[in-house]
Image (cartoon, grey):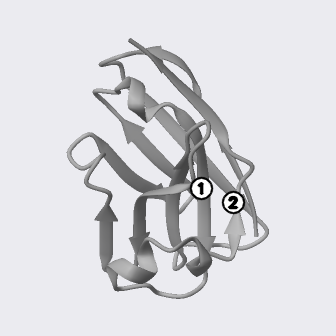
Amino acid sequence: VQLQAFGGGLVQARDSLRLSCAAAGRTFSSYTVGWFRQAPGKEREFVVSSSVGSVYYADSVKGRFIISRDNTKNTVFLQMKSLKPEDTAVYYCAAGSRRLSTITTMTAPLSYDYWGQGTLVTVSS
């Protein structure tokens, strides 16, 4: 499965932005999909994960970000609103063939088999 993330850009605080992650090579409607991000000088951190029957958001984005899928287009979206400067990071989409149901597994990068190349989101104050 090849993943390609796009949609990043430069926005102002309180703006909205939608990221997309397109998958090629296999239909991944049953896959677990997630978004992670990495800010400059920081480690990669979990943002959100969607598995069959489970969705989990990091506390820092809960209520502001929404993950969704369009299985007809093999694409996952991350709708981000009320953006803050601390949301500035490279955003990565990830996918895994296993169904994940615990917070520990859903938030762990090692649970995901495939990664996109990342798309930069910069939020100015």
Label 1 – label 2 distance at C-alpha: 10 Å
State the residue in front, 4 or 41.
41
Residue at 69% x, 60% y: name it: 23
Q: Residues within 10 Å of mark 1 (few under 14, many from 20)?
A: many
Asked if the residue under mark 2 is in contact with the one under mark 1, i.e. CB atoms within 8 Å, the reply is no
Q: In the rendering, which numbered label is found on residue 93?
A: 1
Q: Residue furthest front?
A: 41
Q: Position of residue 38 (x, y in %)?
A: 57, 46
Locate residue 21 relative to residue 55 in the image: left or right.
right
Residue 7 appears in the rendering: no
State the residue in front, 58 or 70.
58
Q: Position of residue 75 (x, y in %)?
A: 58, 54
Q: Position of residue 40 (x, y in %)?
A: 61, 36
* Disc 1, SS: strand
Residue at 39% x, 53% y: name it: 67
Locate residue 41 relative to residue 33 in the image: left or right.
right
State the residue in front, 74 or 111.
111
Residue at 42% x, 66% y: name it: 49
Q: In the rendering, which numbered label is found on residue 83?
A: none
Given the image, on which type of amino acid does mark 2 rest? Ala
Q: Residue furthest left?
A: 63
Residue 73 in which image quadrant: bottom right
Quadrant where the N terminus lies? bottom right
Mark 2 highlights which residue?
23
